[in-house]
Amino acid sequence: MSSHNRSQPSQRQLRVGEQIKHIIADTMLRGHFRDKSLIDAAAVTVTEVRISPDLKNATAYVIALGGADIAKFLPALNDHASTFQKEIARQANLKFTPRIRFASDTSFDNVQRIEQILHEIKYADDTDSESN
């Protein structure tokens, strides 16, 4: 009986996810796309790729640079996922090429919200101590 915690990705999942992240980023950087919406997607950064335990499905989390709205890039990226899958098949030495799905990375938004809350708490503490 294995005591391996399934909620944590394996070393192989982490390694393959990192490899796929670099392939997707390189493909975006080269920008050999005919679709204008994908050319504009060069302003997108891949922050993380999470891959399923069977290595057949992967979710690439992306953010838009320069404050652009990521929602306008996601449909184009998902519509052209096969372009990225072909590059992954060509460059990665995997038995199966994972199906790629693109999603918005909200972790940076969460960090900003937490920092704002902490700032507000500090400000409230400062004003309370000044009034005493």
Image (cartoon, rainbow, N blue to C red):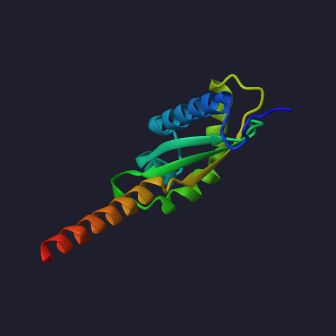
Q: Position of residue 11 (x, y in %)?
A: 64, 28
Q: Residue at x 43, y 62 (%)?
A: 69
Say which of 127 and 40 sits in front: 127
Quarter assignment of residue 8: top right
Say which of 40 and 52 sits in front: 52
Q: Position of residue 48 (x, y in %)?
A: 53, 42
Tell me the quarter of the image containing the C terminus: bottom left
Residue 50 drawn above or below residue 67:
above
Quarter assignment of residue 29: top left
Q: Residue furthest front?
A: 132
Query: Exactly how many numbered labels are in the figure?
Result: 0
Q: Residue at x 61, y 39 (%)?
A: 84
Q: Residue furthest top?
A: 93
In the image, is 46 to the left or to the right of 88?
A: left
Residue 62 drawn above or below residue 84:
below
Quarter assignment of residue 1: top right
Residue 43 drawn above or below residue 55:
below
In the image, is 48 to the left or to the right of 115?
A: right
Q: Position of residue 102 (x, y in %)?
A: 59, 51
Q: Residue furthest right?
A: 1
Say which of 80 and 107 sits in front: 107
Residue 126 drawn above or below residue 8:
below
Say which of 121 and 128 sits in front: 128
Q: Position of residue 36 (x, y in %)?
A: 48, 53
Q: Residue at x 62, y 48 (%)?
A: 80
